[in-house]
Image (tube, rainbow, N blue to C red):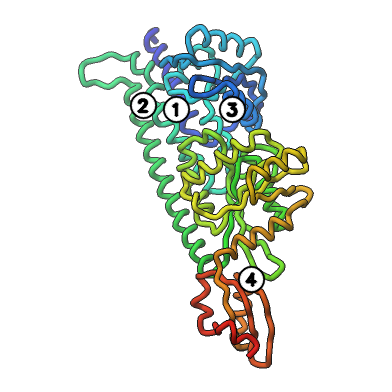
Amino acid sequence: MSANSKEIRIEESDAAAISERAADAHRVDHEAPRAYVVGVSSSELRKEEARELLDELRSLANTLGLDIVGENLVNLREKTPSLLLGSGKAQEIAEAAEAAGADTIVFDHTLSAVQQRNWEKLTSKKVYDRAELIIKIFAARALTKEANLQVELAQLQYSLPRLAHSYDDLMRQRGGRYGTKGSGEQKIELDRREIERRIHEIKNELEAVRKERTVQRRRRERAAVPRAAIVGYTNAGKSSLLNALTAASVKAENKLFATLDPTTRRLLFAQGQTLLLTDTVGFVRNLPHGLVEAFRSTLEEAAQADLLIHVADASDPKVDTHIATTLQVLGEIGAEEVPRVLVLNKIDLARPESVEDFLARYPGSIAVSATSGLGLGALVERIQESLTSGMKVLTLRIPHAQYQLVSLVMREGTVLEERQDDDATWLRCRVPERLEWKLKDCAIEPDAWGN
């Protein structure tokens, strides 16, 4: 074997490894890699905010199971196309990561395919950015078929533009006449076609899932059961709140993205009404655009809800930023116009003065603790008020033979006053406009009450 052919084989092995990492959406390291994290401040990103994002990156890395062995917050004066940072600062970070014993470097700044590849060559370590880290977390935590498909789609869409650079070195190994193709060029075309084919296949599968979800949603709408979605920043306690309100047993951990798949449970009010309550995936700053797109069908639960229960973490000093991030994502998915109730959770972990300041900054918000149950009664009352605020007040005389309409009103509306005689049930009530046509034959004038 010639030296040249041996060199080509080495490059092919390297390229195949890169392709495998790019295409495998569900690969999770069983050992705990030692990670060195790098934050970047700039003229567009203040140092204080960059520090907050770096701290959040550490939490994200811990969620994935990485062992943080060092960090560096650098000031970016001018971006370079090859390494993002200047060569001197890059060498400094490479040496610091090596001294710390890291085998992975994670940047809190988007890296281009060229930059990622150059960093891996410079350090001989795995290097990726915040977007890829979040995708890896989603891949590790997805449970249902739909979530797995969504994660795989995001992974493939993220890695597809990176394929070309993965094969640059391989293509340079082969010369040839005009119009000929080197082995690397052939390999990348095969891989690109395979990835594009799989992306198309996943999109078709997700479309089928969306159609099934639409059918389920229409069934719920025909049943006239109101729906609410719990939304908020990741680790704000959304799943814990769902469990506390509905006696459910949804997995709740003190980790980012503990819940990826939407879970719906019934909340029964004291008056007999029913609410379908859905826990949704948490939001995070700088969420990869591909994940927003991939999880759009999941997040549609928020856009299609009658009410949003926006949960914020009272114990987090960055709660205002997290609220702003959640509102931004809600706007991206078309849910900005849905009525909202802002809930300050984990008040048992916060200072009383911090809670008071929050309630003053956000008038109408509710302070609760999903763990201790404090404030949950007031929250349920607020949810009822919000759901009935747009309802119409009716006076009804419902014959006993149509008692199913009484049950409907009690389930979907609010009964203000009730009495019965030998022939009928009399109700003063608030009902959603969608029910008005079902009750029109029983509606009477208000002054007819008791006559």
Nearer the N terminus, badge 1 or badge 2? 1
Q: Residues within 10 Å of mark 4 (few under 14, many from 20)?
A: many
What residue sits right under mark 1 in the picture?
Answer: 19
Q: Earlier in the sequence, mark 1 or mark 4?
A: 1
Q: Amino acid at mark 3?
A: Leu
x and y percent of residue 311 in the render?
64, 46
Return the residue at label 3.
53
For marks 4 and 3, give the CA distance.
45 Å
Q: Amino acid at mark 2?
A: Lys
| Residue 224: percent from left, percent from top | 54, 69
Q: Earlier in the sequence, mark 4 or mark 3?
A: 3
Q: Is residue 336 visible?
A: yes
Q: Disc 3 vs disc 2: Cβ atoms closer than 8 Å? A: no
Q: Nearer the viewer, residue 331 or 177?
A: 331
- Residue under pointer 2: 187
Q: Which amino acid type is shown beneath numbered disc 4?
A: Thr
| Residue 414, numbered label | 4
Please tell me whether mark 1 or mark 4 is closer to you in this view. Answer: 4
